[in-house]
Amino acid sequence: MKKYSLIILILFICGLHTVNAQNKRPIDPTTLWEMQRPGNPVVSPDGALSVFAVTSYDVEGNTSASNLYLMHNETGNLRQITFSGRDSGPAWSPDGKKLAFVSRRHGGPGQVYILDLAGGEARKASDLPVGVYGLKWFPDGKRIAFAANVLPDYNGDWDTHRQLQKRMGESKVTAKVTENNMYRYWDRWLTDGHVSRLFTLDLYTKEVVDLMPDDGNFFGLMGGVSYDISPDGQTIAVSKNSTKPPYERLNHAIYLVPTDGSGRLTNITADNPANDSNPVYSPDGRYILYGKQTIYHFYADKVIMVLYDTQTGSRTELTADIDLDAEQWFWSEDGRTIYFIAEDRAMKSIFSIPARGGNHTEIFRGGTNNGASLAGIRHMVFSHNNLSAPPEIYKLNMRNGDLTKMTGFNDHLVEYIHWGEIENVTYKGANGADIQMFINYPPDYDPNKKYPLVVMIHGGPHGIFGDTFHFRWNSQLFAAPGYIAILPNFHGSTSFGQDFVQSIHGNHSELPFRDIMKAVDYMIDRDLVDETRMAATGGSYGGYMVSWIAGHTDRFAALINHAGVYDLHLQFASDYSANRMYQYGGSPWENFDQVNAINPSQFAHNFTTPMLVIHGELDYRVPVAHGFMVYNIYKNMGLDARLVYFPDENHWILNPQNSIYWYEEFYNWLDRYLGQ
């Protein structure tokens, strides 16, 4: 009887599994936007807890909300601790009893809030006319450091700053005036002159002190700030731009800032013409670990971890001989080990290296990992995702390598998604080089059939389509209608070494184009795809390559060009044009023929393949005229083309409804020329 009951139970479970399998469906754009997005974990001083923000979206309302969650690192117990929908940037007090975070719950710019974990509501600790960001506690727990962007005329009087803001808001003059090389960035103008500074907030007296009163520069132009407070609380090390107007060149350097408000800044990397970033003090305060690049005009130059001795001024380059581009480094509690993250062969892995230098060790490989922190002496917590899994928080046992999934914010959605299988392959590209590529097969893939092919071309060009769950260019969504999507990491892609990434500097077209064509050949030779039904798609540099493809081959049935560079001369109207001549091997006034040799606009006479053109008005990185130009040329040539224009989007499509519509247009265009 017991055996019979066991058989019935097994059959029942199998039946449930069958029903669940039948209920699974390919991912769709709406489901993508219904997914919650946990941020990187911030671990408490004792390693027992993690706090992180979780962003969720209301698709119908076209809005987002961000709240804080607290997780027990041992048990995984989770509870939401803020509910305003406007909370982010948590930081632990040194005793682990309080959290500081940035909130806009009061309806104004983000301010400092303090939450006592013993109970009670969060209290507002600052009241400034500007938003704050980048909170850090001082070691004594009495002050908090933060960054803010202020008007250059700010003199320490916040009432005066309010009046200046009011006057600017009431002005009827809308002109933007400048003599700078850098005058707008991404989707905003810089002509109002806001400068970035560090401040301290005394939690007892409420006094706010400007630590950089005479500084008129900026931190990261994409937002945020990279700095650390010394263990004795007397000095801050911060990365900021060191060049002056008109900003003919940008150079982020490491500055030491006294915390007494004297404003005596010391540049400790003044001899390096390229960027220095992310300073982090050693636990004993003697060393500052930071990142160094050496080629000022090459944004993808390898970042080398450097140890700066605050007593002697000497430096030790820890990773100069390691062909990895380090980021997100941090110290072990005893100061003997440094952990860091680096892109490596299309994945983003976690490594360690002795603090005195030596061989590095791979701690964890697979997918994309960010925000790693130690949780005690044995465990590490971090955010993990891959091509078939959205971000969640994971815990790694560093002794035995066991990986534990700690959160399941999206399990209720993921369990019903029918993912396409992923294959990681290597093929021979230009000049016989090994080229890595992911293949995303469609759900219910039938190996006896040939499928339409969608080539995904990443931006940059110095970037990757890695093993990551992308919320804009999601390969699973590209494959879902019944296509094979391929993601070749062509010459110039990051994570394959410095020589590989630098191989296209000065010529963005030749090697990547050959690599992409050989990727297509590889798929055809494997008898996987129908070569009469192929499309090439790309955004930014990927859009540049789509236009290049349009002028150099008729192999594709359709093209999709999002925010793509069409005319290299027009890129001198982009938000920062100072280094374009190095990227293109020339300029409109020098080596003119070299620029035109790799300029897609010079090959319009060869256009035949239908093209979908998508662009946003607020795109200052690739100005919208690129999209209008290639579309108008297509129409005047009598060719099939369609324009999708977003007046309220920048280089990326960030609003849920616009993104879902973007995918609708994307799918319709592919269906028109490839079928499903």
Image (spheres, rainbow, N blue to C red):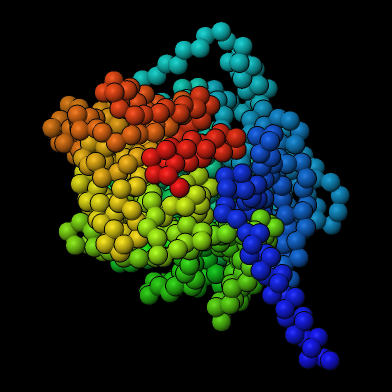
Q: Give the x, y percent position of residue 278.
A: 47, 52
Give the residue drawn at x 77%, y 81%.
Answer: 8
Q: Give the x, y percent position of residue 133.
A: 61, 41
* Residue 49 visible (yes or no): no
The residue at the far right in this view is 120
Of residues 558 and 306, which is closer to you in this image?
558
Of residues 306 and 422, which is closer to you in this image?
422
Give the residue drawn at x 71%, y 30%.
Answer: 108
Q: Quadrant of residue 104?
A: top right
Name the side, left or right, on which 569 lies relative to 83: left
Judge whether 471 appears above or below 419 on screen: above
Of residues 671 and 419, which is closer to you in this image?
671
Q: Give the x, y percent position of residue 169.
A: 61, 15
Judge whether 456 appears above or below 637 on screen: below
Q: Give the x, y percent position of residue 663.
A: 51, 40
Give the quarter of the figure containing the N terminus.
Answer: bottom right
* Residue 569 visible (yes or no): yes
Give the residue drawn at x 24%, y 41%.
Answer: 554
Q: Quadrant of residue 548?
A: top left
The residue at the far front in this view is 448
Number of marks in the rendered image: 0
Name the side, left or right, on which 408 lies relative to 389: right
Name the side, left or right, on which 103 lies relative to 618: right
Give the residue drawn at x 69%, y 40%.
Answer: 58
